[in-house]
Image (spheres, rainbow, N blue to C red):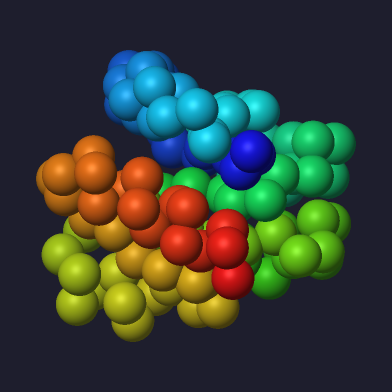
């Protein structure tokens, strides 16, 4: 079972992703956060395998912060920004998925990244 924390500032988008991903028996959403501070705190508490992270227009290095509080966590950037913009800003994230990608692509990415 892949344990996922999802960080996005849109509660409705988080609910949509939860509904879609939890249809997969191999994925469990263990926490949701609306900002980076919440994601860092929840990552430390829940120790997810994967953090789905919206870029949230922040200059913070959220990937590094998450790795410091939850060693071994892998970050998948899930963003509405064009891939070129997101690729430049993703830092040490393991993967990048655009928000308008098919849900199957997101599922496959989560499972692939969790598998190493």
Image quarter hosting the N terminus = top right
Closer to us: 56 or 105: 105
Q: Quadrant of residue 95?
A: bottom left
Closer to us: 77 or 88: 77
The residue sitting at 38% across, 58% down in the picture is 109
The residue sitting at 19% across, 77% down in the picture is 84
Q: Is residue 79 above or below residue 12?
A: below
Instruction: Give how far across and how far down residue 83 sits, in percent.
Output: 20, 70
Q: How many marks?
A: 0
Instruction: Give how far across and how far down residue 53 sits, in percent.
Output: 48, 50
Instruction: Give how far across and how far down residue 28 sits, in percent.
Output: 58, 29
Q: Does the image show residue 63?
A: yes
Q: Is residue 52 above or below residue 84?
A: above
Instruction: Give how far across and how far down residue 29 sits, in percent.
Output: 57, 29
Image quarter hosting the C terminus = bottom right
Q: Does the image show residue 58?
A: no
Q: Is residue 110 above or below residue 13?
A: below
| Residue at far front of view | 25
Q: Quadrant of residue 81?
A: bottom left
The residue sitting at 50% across, 72% down in the picture is 94
Question: Is residue 109 found left or right of 102 in the rendered image?
Answer: right
The residue sitting at 79% across, 36% down in the picture is 46
């Amino acid at each position: 079972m892949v344990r996922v924390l999802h960080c996005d500032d849109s509660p409705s988008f988080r609910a949509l992703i939860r509904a879609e991903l939890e249809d997969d028996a191999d994925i469990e959403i263990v926490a949701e956060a609306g900002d980076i501070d919440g994601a860092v705190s929840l990552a430390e508490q829940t120790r997810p395998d994967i953090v789905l992270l919206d870029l949230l227009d922040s200059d913070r290095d959220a990937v590094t912060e998450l790795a410091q509080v939850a060693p071994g966590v892998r970050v998948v950037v899930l963003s509405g920004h064009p891939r070129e913009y997101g690729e430049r800003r993703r830092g040490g994230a393991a993967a990048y998925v655009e928000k308008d990608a098919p849900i199957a692509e997101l599922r496959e990415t989560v499972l692939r990244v969790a598998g190493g």
